[in-house]
Image (tube, rainbow, N blue to C red):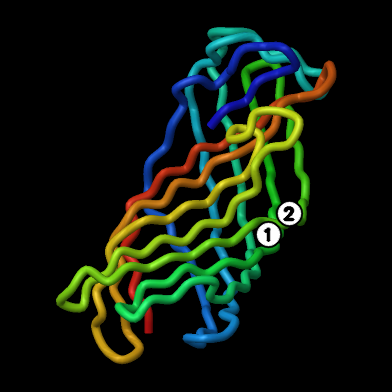
Amino acid sequence: MEIRGFKQDNATEDWSKSGPTLRFEYWRTKENDWNYGLVFQPLSLRYRDSLRSDLSAKGKTFRSGDQASLDYQFPTVRFSANKPIFQNEDGSYIRAGGSAVVRYAKVGLSASRQSFSDTNLLVVPLINLEASKPIGSGYSVFARSDFLPGIGGHVFLDGLYDVYFGARKKMGSANDLDVGVRLFFGGYDPKKTDEYANRIFFNALVVRYTF
């Protein structure tokens, strides 16, 4: 998690949180046609640590060294669609399409003398890519990503990226077991005084069963 004021250092440097979370996905799939997916990712975290630098935002000033707590909510709903652009006889494929993410964010920062809370709701279009490569004995390497590079700033840190990569085991005609890693990161820079930057780095070990 990263919070910084306009032209200021990261006030929450090295703040981190670990814990389990759930992700719900529904996909309607057709081998040679469009696939459609609906994804819901709830995320609610509470951090508590000392501020690493001064932070001026929303008319409030927080001082380096102050003990502070950060309540962060970031639930997202994603609608995706993709179709094959490459298929091989061994079952390998690449799919491409697009996604629309409806994202609600709530940030609440509290210290002994100051506090502020901010919310926003965004609808963001993303590029969707999916790929799979069989490796034998019912196993395959599988990857899926939704992303939008930053424009007019840092390509990665000012964009939005949700990337999954892992191994898939075929458990039945309509059942799969996935084990892999997910990287979710992105945010924005403040453009003027009294604004703040909000960037998130969310890394997860994923176990997913499809039925």
User: Which label number is shown at residue 101?
Assistant: 1
Classify 149 as above or below 99: above
Pointer 1 and pointer 2: residues touching (CB < 8 Å)? yes
Q: Residue at x 73, y 36 (%)?
A: 151
Pinpoint residue 72: horizontal percent, then vertical percent. Answer: 60, 41
Q: Residue 126 at what x, y percent from top left? A: 66, 56
Residue 40 x/y as whole percent: 57, 66
Q: Amino acid at mark 2?
A: Val
Above-or-below relation of 207 to 43: below
**Amino acid of disc 1:** Val
Asked where in the image residue 160 lies, by quadrant, the reply is top right
Is 21 situated above or below 199? below
Please tell me which residue lies in front, 24 or 37: 37
**Residue that sits furthest to the bottom in the current view:** 173
Task: Identify the secondary structure beneath mark 2.
Answer: strand
Judge from the rendering whether residue 205 lies leftward or rightward of residue 113; answer left or right: left
Residue 83 - label: none
Q: Which residue is mark 2?
A: 124
Measuring from the top left, give residue 21's x and y in whole percent. Answer: 42, 56
Choose between 69 and 150: the one closer to the eye: 150
Q: Is residue 28 left or right of residue 141?
A: right
Residue lying farthest to the front in this orientation: 89
Disc 1 from disc 2: Cα separation: 5 Å
User: Crowding near pointer 2: few (<14 within 10 Å), some, many (20+)?
Assistant: some
